[in-house]
Amino acid sequence: MNDYSIIDFSKNQNFKEKIAILGFGREGQSVFRFLKKSPAYRDAEIWVLDKDTTLKLGKIKSRLGLDYLKNLTDFDIIFRSPGIPYSLPEIQKAQKSGVEISSLTKLFFEEVKKIQRRQGGKPKIIGVTGTKGKGTTATLIYQILKKSGFRTILAGNIGKPMLDYVEKATKADFLVLELSSFQLHDLTASPDIAVILDIFPDHLDAHASLKEYYDAKASIGRFQKKSDRIFYFSTNPLSKQLAAKSPAKKIAVTPKEDNLKKNYLMAATVGRSLGATDAIIEKTIKSFKGLEHRVELVRELHGIQFYNDSCATNPTATAAAIHSFQAPVILIAGGKDTKFDYRPLAKALKNSTVKLVLLFGENKKKIASAIKPQARMTQFCPNVQSALRVAYSFAKKFRIDSADAVVLFSPASKSFDMFKNYAERGKAFKKLVRKIR
């Protein structure tokens, strides 16, 4: 007999798993609610880490302020919110030391996969990603399937955080998820049905490189099975390349060159493959009014249409919006200075009906320099309100010839120089438009 005794830590009541929720926005709060209700984490010690010192957390253990990333190696699991880059040195150091790095999306996939094993494969997860158009396409797929009689849930980067739907998922046929690169970054599972829309450079301010951004997007299909399906745009080289990384059955979707509603086509193709009829698809698309801040008609006044496209946070998105109009366009753009290449915007202006470009924000001079050869007229404005005033005055000139005109607010830039996010920016623009008399 020796002097050593075997200790069973699973029965040690003094051992508590230490968990950090990194970022306490909508998703962080959803993770907290789930962990508190889950038997698996009932005895865990949960901490909230956030740079916002104004959070009211009551008795919740927390570390707030500039040092919120300090000593991450103290935890067993860290649930990272999407807005906090996976590549941060503090997170990478913690992972290398053995800390498990997870996220709301990763936890949700784990829980749904458990449900699928119990229920013979249901519900199926449909994941939609792309640089732009995710919200529109995911919403249309959801509406098509719901109107076809399927029990369907829409979540992800749109609406409620997906983890709030875990209990309802047991009774669903399909879970449609809009998935950003930040949500896909650290996934180890993929949707049963993946959808890749147009991919182009974006989020260079949050990802370490374009390669990291594309690698994150590729996770939507990387862990699929051969029996799964992945839809992609054959006309977009990056969409095609990322789909090729999936072992699933690949389904190419080829829009016509003049098809301005290519994401509608993708939604229709996915819906049809899952049993929706052409009649329901057509009816759903005709009644679809679009999503807020995405080429959204705010108002028409004296033949002048005002569109809010605040969701266009990069030049390629604004280029697509410009080509949506045949009437004379007054473009309002500008915002946070990032590493964007504005040549796609310059190219779009070359063959467009844009008559005036009004630029505001931190990057106005950078955009002006890039579009100079193509822009008919360019004018700097101190803010959105000033730009709108000039745009309306200029647009009224077209009414002399009884021609319609469009004022398009499509910034081609991030919003963080003046606004909290693109939604706040879009709401501010709409409020200003509605005040015009």
Image (cartoon, rainbow, N blue to C red):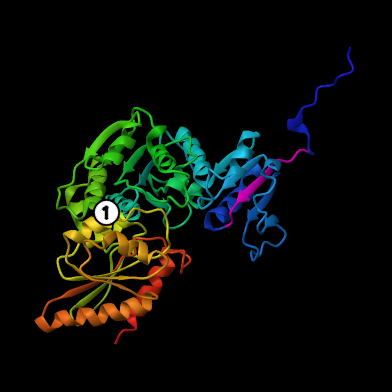
Q: In this view, does 427 lie to the left or right of 286?
A: right
Magenta region, residue range: 15-24
Kindly give the residue lying farthest to the top in the view shown. 1
Task: Between residue 170 and residue 293, name the one nearer to us.
Answer: 293
| Percent x, y of residue 403 | 12, 77
* Local SS, label 1: helix
Above or below residue 124? Residue 178 is below
Task: Between residue 137 and residue 362, name the one nearer to us.
Answer: 362
> Label 1 amino acid?
Pro
How crowded is the residue under tag 1: few (<14 C-alpha within 10 Å), some, or many (20+)? some
Q: In this view, does 224 lie to the left or right of 352?
A: right
User: In the rendered picture of this protein, how many numbered marks are placed on residues?
Assistant: 1
- Asked whether the viewer can see residue 284, the reply is no
Which quadrant, please, contains the N terminus? top right
Residue positioned 62% across, 58% down in the render: 51
* Residue 22 lies in the magenta stretch: yes
Residue positioned 69% across, 55% down in the render: 63
| Percent x, y of residue 147 | 28, 53
Above or below residue 56? Residue 4 is above
* Residue 388 lies in the magenta stretch: no
Q: In this view, does 352 lie to the left or right of 202?
A: left
Which quadrant, please, contains the C terminus? bottom left
Task: Between residue 205 and residue 260, name the one nearer to us.
Answer: 205
Residue position for label 1: 344
Task: Between residue 225 and residue 381, name the one nearer to us.
Answer: 381
Residue positioned 31% across, 37% down in the render: 230
Residue 98, picture quadrant: top right
| Percent x, y of residue 171 | 43, 46
Residue 192, picture quadrant: top left
- Asked whether the viewer can see residue 403, the reply is yes
